[in-house]
Image: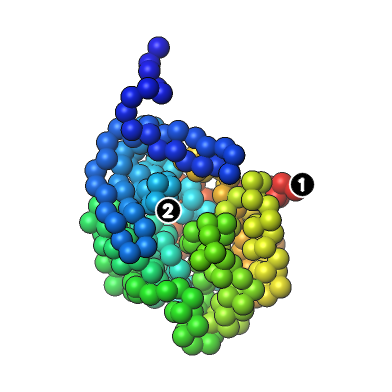
Amino acid sequence: MEDYIIGGIYVIEPTSPKLASLFKAKKIFVTEKTPYQEIMLAEIEDFGRALIIDNLIQSTERDEYIYHESLVHPAMVLHPNPRKVLIIGGGEGATLREVLKHKTVEEAVMVDIDEKVVEFSKKYLEYMHQGSFYDKRAKVIIMDGQKYVRESPDNYYDVVILDLTDPYAGEAAKPLYSEKFYREIHRILREDGVVVTQAGNSFYYREAYDYVYNNLSKVFPQVVEYWVWIPSFTYTCNFILGSKIYDPRKMSEEEVDKILSDRGVKTKFLNGKRFIGLLKLGIIKG
């Protein structure tokens, strides 16, 4: 029997305050410290190359597409003509990659506070960003996301995508999930704008999840929630989508597939059937 506990390097991935998983690292390629965090590129058994920040797995080669497609495409498909898109966070460039698949996009602004994460990603994570940083439609800004939103003009963006740290990651993360911040997002969105945020896990962190959902619901008239199992996170990741006018529950599988096809979007996970299925799953209460 293979020895899978003793020896080697392991990443401890917390699922909740009382539960964690062990991931065996085959190789550590590089580590760097920034003013904000520690970044690592490692090869993880069963998951391939992985971006690890402050000892927490952010994205892996094997399953990152599940997270990034689920975050990006429901909001992008819901908007009939997303030309200007804002991404807050998403330093590895994979969210930007998915946004740029939509040929309607004329401008995709990605704002990240940590320049070293972006430079690290450009240098080591080409397999993940796939050149998205260098697309002529992309604009990468190193800046605090809250500050950028506060200084943005009214009614400018069609879609805003919040690829943030979890709402329970610390006090610094909480303002990015506040009602005040969502009102600023509402202000910078056009009259038919759409916003989506990742919201951590609703099963283990119910209070934090409800905080996010309730705040978004106070600002946007159309709000839906959905979740996806991310193997390397060892839990389901929740997403909450808000819209000024569009209701994604009125879309059909065929309509979603046609939009993706017409825009030239190729995906591995998200299609019309899964889009509708995710909206029907519901959130575990209790």
Left or right for 20, reference 106: right
Left or right for 221, reference 148: right
Q: Find residue 142 and report its image quarter.
A: bottom left
Residue beneath disc 1? 286
Residue closer to the observer: 114 or 110: 114
Q: Find residue 99 and report its image quarter.
A: bottom left
Q: Residue furthest top?
A: 1
Q: Quadrant of the N terminus?
A: top left
Crowd rating for badge 1 (residues with CA inside 10 Å; few <14, some 14–19, many 20+): few
Q: CA distance from mark 2 to mark 1?
A: 37 Å
Residue closer to the observer: 71 or 149: 149
Q: Residue at x 42, y 53 (%)?
A: 266
Q: Residue furthest right?
A: 286
Q: Earlier in the sequence, mark 2 or mark 1?
A: 2
Q: Residue at x 48, y 54 (%)?
A: 69
Q: Are marks 2 and 1 in contact (CB under 8 Å)?
A: no
Q: Is residue 246 above or below residue 26?
A: below
Q: Disc 2 or disc 1, which is closer to the eye?
A: 1
Image spot of residue 92 (x, y percent):
35, 57
Image spot of residue 200 (x, y percent):
57, 53
Can the viewer see residue 256? no
Q: Please, what secondary structure does the residue beneath circle 2 have?
A: loop
Residue beneath disc 2? 266
- Identity of the amino acid at label 1? Gly
Q: Is residue 245 above or below residue 202?
A: below
- Identity of the amino acid at label 2? Lys
Image spot of residue 269 (x, y percent):
49, 46
